[in-house]
Image (tube, rainbow, N blue to C red):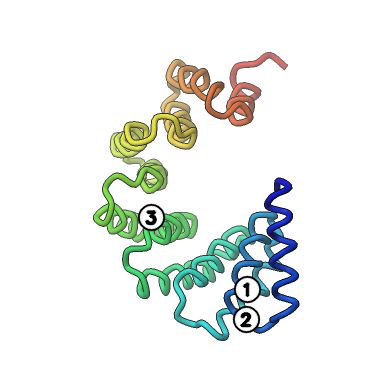
Amino acid sequence: MNAEQEREKEQREAALQQDPDNPRKQYELAVSYIDQQRNEEALELLDRCIEIKRRDPEVLYARAVTNLALGTYRKAACDLMKTIVLDPGFLQAYKHLGFVQFMLGKEEAALKTLQKGLAIDPEYADIYCVLGDAYLDLGELDKAKEAFEKALDLEPQNPEPHSKIAMYYLSRGDMKGLKREYEILKTLDAALAGQIGTLFFEAP
C-alpha cells in the first residue's frame, strides 16, 4: 500500500469512529482493509454493513472477494450468486463465480456462468482466462487455447493471458511456446517471468 492509500485508510478509520454504524463508511474502510490484505477485519466490517444493507450488490461482492481471499469458497459463491441476482450486469461477479465453481470442481456450472458473463460483454478478457482454465481442466485443449488467445487479442499487454497460455503450452509439453511467453512476460511482469524462469529455464 502506498502513502496515499495509507492516508485514505486512516481517514476512513477516523470517519468510521465518528459514525460507527454508517454502512457506507463501514464498506469504504473494508475496501481499504482488502487492499491491505487485512481480510478478517474487512470481513467483520462487511458483515456489519450487510446487516443493514442486505440487498447491496457492491457490498455483497466485496464480501465475496474477501471470502475468496480467505479460501471460504462456498460462502463466496453464495454472495456472488446474490450479487448477480441483484445486478445481472455485474461482470466481475460472473468471473469470480465461474472461478469459484471451477475451484469447487463444478466445471460445467463454471462454463455456464462464464458464458453468461460473455453474453453481456464478449470483450471481457478476464473471463476468457477463467474459461480457458475450465476447458483445460476438462481436457478440452483446443477450446482452452482459443479462450486464452481471445484474451490475448483483447489485452495483449496484460500479463495474465500470457501466463495462462504459457501454462497451456506447458500442459502440451511445448517448451518453445512456453519460452516464447516467458520472454514476453519479462517485459510485462518481471516477477512472474522470474518464477517461470526459475522453474524451467534458469540454471540453479
Mark 1 lies on a secondary structure that is helix
* Tag 3: amino acid: Glu
- Identify which residue is drawn at 26% across, 56% down: 120
**Location of residue 157 in the rendering, given as x and y in whole percent from the top left corner:** 44, 30
Q: Earlier in the sequence, mark 2 or mark 3?
A: 2
Instruction: Tell me where residue 115 sits by quadrant.
Output: bottom left
- For the residue pair 178 and 187, the one nearer the viewer reads as 187
Which residue is drawn at the image coordinates 48% and 37% (left, top)?
160
Q: Is residue 103 left or right of residue 45?
A: left
On the picture, is 121 further left or further right than 174?
left
Task: Please report contact status of discs 2 and 1: CB closer than 8 Å, yes or no.
Answer: yes
Residue 57 percent coordinates (x, y): 44, 72
Separation of marks 3 and 1 at Cα, in angstroms? 37 Å
Q: Secondary structure at mark 3?
A: helix
Q: From the image, tell me which residue sits under label 1.
A: 25
Q: CA distance from mark 2 to mark 1?
A: 5 Å
- The residue to which callout 2 is attached is 22
Q: Is residue 116 left or right of residue 39?
A: left
Say whether disc 3 or disc 1 marks the residue closer to the N-terminus: 1
**Residue nearer the viewer, 81 or 32:** 32
Give the residue at mark 3. 107
